[in-house]
Image: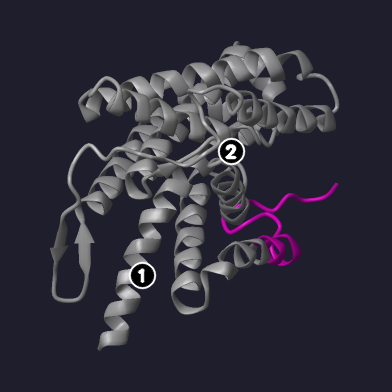
Amino acid sequence: MEHIIYILQQVVNGLQLGAVYALIALGYTMVYGVLRLINFAHGDVFMLGAFVAYFLISKFSMPIYLVFILTMFSCALVGYLIEKIAYKPLRDAPKISLLITAVGVSLFLEYFLSLNAIFTPNYIAFPRPFDVKAYDFTFLSITNVQVIIFIITFISLFILYLLIYKTKYGIAMRAVSHDKETASLMGVGIDGIISFTFIVGASLAGVGGILYGIAYPQINVFMGIMPGIKSFIAAVLGGIGVIHGAVAGGLIIGICEVFVSAFLSSTFRDGVIFIILFAVLLFRPRGLFGKRIEKV
C-alpha cells in the first residue's frame, strides 16, 4: 500500500511539472502549425515571463491576478516583436535560415539580458505570493501550489480551446495551418494570423513562467533552456502542430521526468527525456496524435 501511495504522489508531482511543459509546448506546436517553424526562442519567452512576474511581485507587490495579466501582456509583446523583427523578413527564405535565426534570437535574449544588473545569470529566489499549504488525503497529499497550477492550466487550455474552435481568429488559424495559400485566397490575412499565433503562444509561455516560479522558486536568465527543450520534445511526442498532442506530450514528459528522479536518479532525468525523443523519431515520427502524410 505504501508503494501505491508513493506512486500516486509522484503522478501528482509529474502532472504539476507536465502542466507547465504543456503550456510551453502549446507555443511550439501553434507556431509550427501556421509557419512550419520551430521557435527555439520560445523557452526564453517563458524565462521572461518568470522575471516579469518576479519584479511585479517583489518590487511592486501587485496582486496575483494583475501579475498574470501584465505578464501575459509583456510576453505577448515580446513574442510579437520577435516575429516582426526576426522572422517576418525571412518568411520566404529557406527553412534553415529561419531555424538559425531562431537559435540566434534565443542566444541573444539569454546573453544580452545576462549582461545587466536587472536580469542576473545567478539564481534568485522567486517570491511566492502566498504560503504553501498541504492538504492530506487518504492516499496522497496535494499542496495549494499544485491546485493553483492545475486550475490555471485548465482555465488556460479551456480559453485556448474556445479561441481556436469558437472564434473567427481560431478558424483562420486552422485554415492557415491547413493550407496557407488557399486561406490567403479566401481573404485571410496571413501576416496578422501569424502574429496573432505568436502572441497567443507567448502569452501561454508567460503563464507557464509564473507557475514554474511559484512551484520551483528559483529563476535565472538561462532557466528557459531545458524546459524549452523538454517542451519541444513534448510537442514532438504529442504530434507537432496538434494542440491536444502538445498537452498530452507535456503531461507525459512531466510524469516521466518525476518518475525517473524518484525511482532511479535525478541525474538520469534529462537523458531519459532525450531517449523518448529518439524513440519517437525512430518508431513514430508523426507523434502520438499526428496524422500520417501519404507520399505521392
Q: What stretch is highlighted in magenta?
A: 277-296
Residue 184 versus residue 272 in the image, above or below: above
Tell whether 233 sits left or right of 55: right
Q: Which quarter of the rendered picture does the N terminus lie within?
A: bottom left
Q: Does the magenta stretch include residue 9?
A: no
Is residue 186 in sight in this rendering? Answer: no
Badge 1: residue crowd in 10 Å (few <14, some 14–19, many ≥20): many
Tell whether 140 sits left or right of 255: left
Q: Nearer the viewer, residue 35 or 104?
A: 104
The spot of residue 85 in percent (x, y) is: 67, 13
Residue 154 versus residue 275 in the image, above or below: above
Tell whether 282 sits left or right of 166: right
Residue 154 versus residue 258 in the image, above or below: above
The residue pinned by badge 1 equals 10
Quarter-wise, where is residue 100 in the image? top right
Mark number, residue 144: none
The spot of residue 243 in percent (x, y) is: 50, 43
- Disc 1, SS: helix
Sequence order check, earlier mark of 2 and 1: 1
Residue beneath the point at 83% across and 50% down: 295
Q: Which amino acid does label 2 sit on?
A: Tyr
Residue beneath the point at 53% across and 30% down: 45
The residue pinned by badge 2 equals 28
Q: What residue type is labelled 1?
A: Gln
Q: Specify the principal SS of the magenta part.
A: loop
